[in-house]
Amino acid sequence: MARPREFEEDAVLDAAMECFWNRGYEATSMRDLVEKTGITGASLYNAFGDKRALYERALDRYVEGSVADRMKRCEQLPPREAIAAFFDEIVKRSLADQDRKGCMLVNAALDVAPHDPEFQRVVAEVLTRIEVFFRHCAKRGQKQGTINASLPAEELARHLLGVLLGIRVLARVRPDRAVLEGVVGPAMALLDSSCRRARGRN
């Protein structure tokens, strides 16, 4: 008869996520994970597999609890407000990040994905989900006349994705409100530009 686990799996994943998030995949050792989670290395292996498998589970937990949750909340808003709220939260989180650990997804894109085809796929899929969120917002806003219709929604979405990644990387070395808002501002102005011209002609 198998022994019941003597730990809460979600709590262990949260602890592992914080460890990987702070130190990065390569710099995190199994000893670090044992110390952070408070369970033995054997228990970690039995429950989650090797370090790579645990990292994948931790990254997925981060994505669903942070990135996916943010998109779900923002998509309830009108399209233009949804995009603004998304970036407002990104700026606030970046400025509140005293340890400058950044976004775990972006860290994975820079730290792990270039050397691991499977993680390239995982990260690319999440970035595509974010791009789809932006594209849906842009399309809805264009139909409603609240977002610039002079550019295809697909191009606006790709631009916004690039802005997001730029903010997340920039914030790790220059977490300055004026700098980060200075990146977001022109992107939001691009969404508004043709709408304002159209209103001005009415």
Image (cartoon, rainbow, N blue to C red):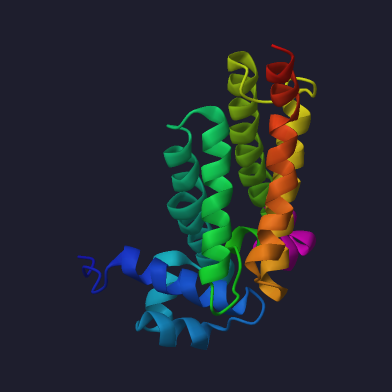
Q: Quadrant of residue 146?
A: top right
User: Residue at coordinates 52% horizontally, 61% vertically from top-left?
Assistant: 92
Task: Report the residue at 27% width, 68% height from top.
Answer: 8
Task: Give the residues drawn in magenta, as a range.
Answer: 107-118
Which residue is more in the foreground, 111 or 181?
181
| Image quarter hosting the C terminus | top right
Say if 141 sits above or below 7 in the image.
above
Camera-nearest residue between 43 and 119: 119
The x, y position of residue 168, in whole percent, is 66, 61
In this orientation, does residue 120 appear?
no
Question: Is residue 14 toward the left or the right of residue 173 in the image?
Answer: left
Q: Residue at x 70, y 25 (%)?
A: 196
Residue 177 falls within the magenta-colored stretch: no
Q: Is residue 17 visible?
A: yes
Q: Nearer the viewer, residue 29 or 192?
A: 192
Tell me which corner region of the image, top left, top right, bottom left or bottom right, holds residue 43. Answer: bottom left
Quarter of the picture containing the N terminus is: bottom left
Image position, residue 82 (x, y; %): 52, 36
Residue 46 image offset from top left, x and y in percent: 40, 70
Q: Is residue 172 left or right of residue 67?
A: right
Number of numbered discs visible in the structure rendering: 0
Residue found at the far top of this picture: 202
Magenta segment's dominant SS is helix
Q: Is residue 68 above or below residue 146?
A: below
* Nearer to the camera, 166 or 112: 166
In the displayed structure, would residue 191 be above or below residue 16?
above
**Residue 137: x, y in percent?**
59, 28
Does the magenta portion include 113? yes
